Image (tube, rainbow, N blue to C red):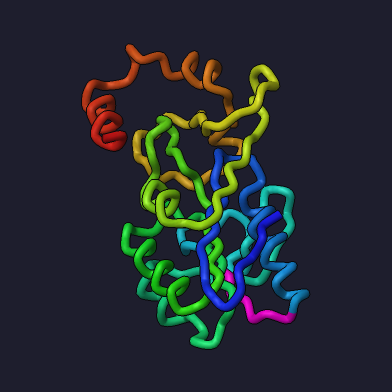
Amino acid sequence: MILQPRDVGWIEVICGPMFSGKTEELIRRLTRANYARQTVQIFKPGIDDRYEAEAVVSHSQRSLPGVAVEDLQALKAALDPNVEVIGIDEVQFFDQEVVSFCEELADSGRRVIVAGLDQDYRGRPFGPMPRFLSVSEYITKLMAICVRCGNPAHRSYRLAEDPQQVLVGTDEQYEARCRRCFAEGYPASSIPESELNQNSSAEQ
């Protein structure tokens, strides 16, 4: 349970691999805020068109009406100036500026809840998530179940042979895997040296 401060804003991060329940947890928190009669808005990147265009939907089909935006500028334009609680799903798809904007919202007394992948399909830090993890007041890291061995899983393994970092998908394109099963699919020798260098730079 989160002990919420009074009269100040803050940032909450919900992160983990695919199929760990991140969107489900985001929806749960925003639903409780609605019950508390707080004004709520929820956003998602327009690239996420897997289920419904005008709603944020979890893999278990739980949903809340939401606004799909193409970028941060569109999110700013759609934001209600009087909103008290802001949720952003799949926040890893936004650029780095989203972190500073969420800090501005928190500094103005709003509660900001973001959910997203903390690692991409190669296990590398994903987009603005490392910065969110350093500036947020509350962090919830969820685990999925490894489809190969049943252990707790914290990585998203891509089944599709596509090298681009951003590839929105479902269980037809991805599996949740534990550290061991992830490494068996991506042995170190199979990762190009350029990608290993990217990993090293991201971790510094």
Q: Kindly indicate the quadrant of the structure image that contains residue 144.
A: top right
Whether the magenta-drawn stretch holds residue 38 is answered as yes
Answer left or right for 79 relative to 84.
Answer: left
The magenta segment is: 37-43
Whether the magenta-drawn stretch holds residue 117 is answered as no
Q: Residue at x 55, y 38 (%)?
A: 17
Q: Against 58, is 200 above or below?
A: above
In the image as oriented, which residue stretches furthest toward the front?
Answer: 6
* 167 or 44: nearer the viewer: 44
Q: Position of residue 23 (x, y in %)?
A: 63, 54
Q: Residue at x 45, y 79 (%)?
A: 108
Q: Residue at x 38, y 67 (%)?
A: 71
Q: Position of residue 11 (x, y in %)?
A: 51, 62
Answer left or right for 81 relative to 23.
Answer: left
Q: Is residue 100 visible?
A: yes
Q: Kindly indicate the quadrant of the structure image that contains residue 1.
A: bottom right
Q: Position of residue 27 (x, y in %)?
A: 68, 61
* 45 or 36: nearer the viewer: 36
Q: Against 143, is 51 above or below?
A: below
Q: Is residue 75 visible?
A: no
Q: Against 29, is 111 above or below?
A: below
Answer left or right for 17 relative to 29.
Answer: left
* 105 or 170: nearer the viewer: 105
Q: Position of residue 63 (x, y in %)?
A: 70, 62
In the image as oriented, which residue stretches furthest toward the right?
Answer: 35
Please count the marks in the image: 0
Task: Please state, as top left, top right, bottom left or bottom right, where the C terminus lies in the image.
Answer: top left
Q: Residue at x 41, y 82 (%)?
A: 77
